[in-house]
Amino acid sequence: MIAGVFAGVSTRARILVAALAVVLLAAPLVLDRYLLSVLILVCLAAYTGQAWNVLLGFAGLLSLGHALYLGLGAYISAALYVHYGIGPWLSVFPAIAACILVATLLGWLAFRFRIEGVYFALLTIAFAEVARVGFDHIAFTGGAGGFFLPVRSEDQGQWWNLRGGPTFFYYLALLLAGNALLLCALLRRSRIGHRWLAVREDPEAARALGIDVNRARMSALLLSAAMTGIAGVFQAFYANNLFPSQIFDISRSIDIILAPIIGGVGTLFGPILGAFVLAPLGEVLISATGAVGLNAPGTKALFFGLFLMAIIAGVPSGLWPRLAGVLRLRSAPDDHALSHRRDEALPRSCRGGRCFAERRSWFDLRGDRSKRRR
Amino acid sequence: MIGPNGAGKTTLFNLIAGVFATDAGTITFADERIDRASPEHICQLGVARTFQIVRPFPELTVIENAAIGGMLRAPDMDEAYARAGEILRRLDLWDKRARKAHELTLPDRKRLEVARALATRPNLLLLDEVMAGLRPTETDRILEILRTLNREEHITIVMIEHVMRAVMALATRVHVLHHGATIAEGTPAEVTRDPRVIESYLGAEDFA
Amino acid sequence: MTLSLYAEVLIQGVLTGLVYGLMALGLSVIFGVVRVVNFAHGEFAVLAMYATFVLFTATHLDPILAAIPIAALFFVIGWLLQRLVVQPFVVRPQHDQFILLVGLAIVLVNALLMIFGPDSRHTDLPYAYDSWFVGPIIVDKVRAYGAAAALAVAAALFAFFRFTLTGTAIRACADNLTGAAVVGLDIKKLYALTFGLGLACAGAAGAIMVALTDVTPMLAPSFTLLAFTIVIVGGLGSMTGALLGGLLIGVVEALASAIIAPSMKSMVSFALLVAVLALRPQGLLGKPAT
């Protein structure tokens, strides 16, 4: 089955992936502590980006509140460790369960009441905000003042409690990112993956082909939430401190979406490429602006914002499809991005690759069509 | 099913396919009431439909489009793709199978829509103005395919059509809808001679 | 809590809510006509707050009076933004628009952060602590003036849409875009105008808010969310709805702040948002999907 994943991939691509894998595996041998920590963040960004991508790139739902699951996963695993001594390899399960529970609630609200598009995005923001304010008041996890995991030198090496050095965390992050990639590649070819794509492209047409759109969306949401929850567990044990205002904040949610959007939503390698582009870009920006004297907080974020705007305006399907084209990697089914072609030849109603009768009006709050819809 | 614009033909299709809810009355298919069923359940029962303005999955390839249709009754994805390939060959789309749906011309997109619906192995196929915008040669080709499907695979086909060539050539029975009601019913020959039908198409009050 | 205290909280909520409503009105107009999701709306309001603050520091121009020049400035900004940046995105998928404006919001917030720093800035107004005594109830003059100004701007906007030809043309665009184009309306120009008006509202609201609260860049995301909440609760496509929604949210937040805890007020708003999205998505005064 694993071999099947790479069936449609050209030799060129296989070599590149293998080379990348080797480089990444050997990284700790050559890189210093600082660069390794940057790579850890890159891998984590690639992982969470992949998780978020499942929801938008596969099922077509935009979530701007994904930090919710990050925070839930982090807080639950941290609380279980600090208060009951339960290790993260165990507590990841209740963490995932919590994320799935909350996502089920969100999904039920959205799908039962047909909240789609930007309203769904707002709903996700609302949920994250509720968590942010809520956790400020939960004394059990430190409230607004923060929650701290004990870092004792005698614990070093306890891999079962995720106590280790940068190399340890790096390989763990790499493992997560690699598994996410594999999972998404497998899913892409599976029945559920095809259902998701159909739902993303055109929910009505998908229904007419026997696909239960709500069920498909719910499963994408739950998977995305669970995966992000795992990232939260990592985050808790890596950073060793948690603040509701940081981990549930909308800026965190936006951080999550930067890499996949820049790399290419809906593609397999987009989130990874995006993560690899953003990290060095960030570092370069910091040193460049530092040299010029622009050291104010927010400089990096400002440039990322500009970069995001530039990408969505100029290269909306992301950098990965461009790169894949340049490297002449065969356009395998992995390279699907949300459509952004200039379809001059098609009638106006088909612009943007969507051949719908008319552009959906904002007034159609109930997502799909009007009339006496059930 | 024929009738002037606004007669309710596509609405009827939407009712059958479960997109609209009925205000009154029932719809039965294969001894099961479907007026309360969801569109996906109705498809699972064996009803497939095309849309008046075609909506293939734009960013997916032709064969992926068809395979998603084929997924319904296939035990696994390989089977689904096999079924898709078979249908595409039938509908002369095999050569274009790796192209993305939005790259196709309109006649090809129409055929893809039909292919995708067929891949679900329906018992009832609802075709909404599939001939519109096609050249006579293309119309003939589709007619040929539909005739074969009906004969060999025993698929019941209900077509909404304005292209009278297709109606006369293909239909065994014709319903004429006007202002939401059936005003005539019969063989193509009978119906086209019916004065009420002629009046509904040419009558003064039908400029709405 | 005594009855008079409740009344005070209520009045405070109404008055503040009217200013929020003005901001939301801008969003509703943009959302309803240009059909673009202005996720940077709150950020523009805060930008206006800083502009007003700078103006005040330099010229001691009262923030509430400054609403007029600031609104004019932001009208131009909105017009230019629509023409130069947003127009190509009008036909793009929703997600693209959203992301573009999220990017813009990030840029704005962090620019403000870089220039002014995270600390909040306070404006000292001579009448900041004056109040009227209506029986046992205390009404802050600042809030009353602010609310009055907000109402005035809203009224001007209403009058524009109701009584001028251009206003009617814009309403036509919102109603039926194809029809509007077919009768020869210059859609691009009208869009730019509308965006300008929308940001002018945000600008005016921001200016007024300088008199009511301290300025910090961190207000921006919560203002955006607030604006969206109000628009959805009040009803998409309804200007009265935006104001009414603002009033409602203002009151709800004031009450929640007084009865539960100040930090919980946004949770109550969100609960309302979720309830509305689920149960009555067209909001209080919006048109149901036909």
Image (spheres, coloured by chain):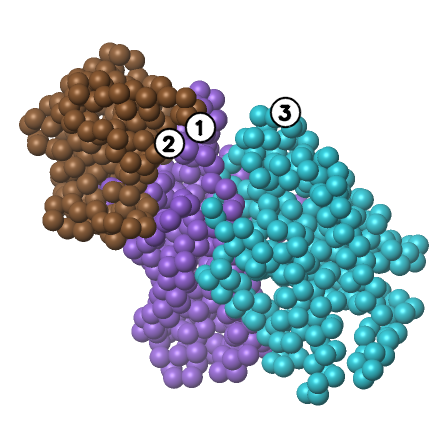
Chain colours: A purple, B brown, C cyan
Against B88, residue C99 (above or below) is: below
Q: Secondary structure at mark 2?
A: loop
Identify which residue is drawn at 52% across, 68% down. Answer: C271
Against A178, residue B12 (above or below) is: above
User: Residue C280: where, in percent of width, then height?
Assistant: 49, 60
Marks 3 and 1 belong to one chain? no
* Along the viewing direction, whichever of C275 and B23 lies nearer the viewer: B23
Circle nearer the viewer, 1 or 2: 1
Q: CA distance from mark 1 to mark 2?
A: 8 Å
Against A302, residue B196 (above or below) is: above
| Mark 2–mark 3 CB contact (< 8 Å) | no
Marks 2 and 3 belong to one chain? no
Identify which residue is drawn at 71% across, 39% down. Answer: C167
What residue is disc 1 on? B208
| Mark 1–mark 2 CB contact (< 8 Å) | yes
User: Residue A142: where, in percent of width, then height?
Assistant: 53, 80
Mark linked to residue B6? 2
Q: Quadrant of the C terminus of chain B?
A: top left
Q: CA distance from mark 2 to mark 3?
A: 27 Å
Q: Amino acid at mark 2?
A: Gly
User: Residue A209: where, in percent of width, then height?
Assistant: 24, 41
Circle nearer the viewer, 3 or 1: 1
Crowd rating for badge 3 (residues with CA inside 10 Å; few <14, some 14–19, many 20+): few
> Taking C202 as reference, is A159 left or right?
left
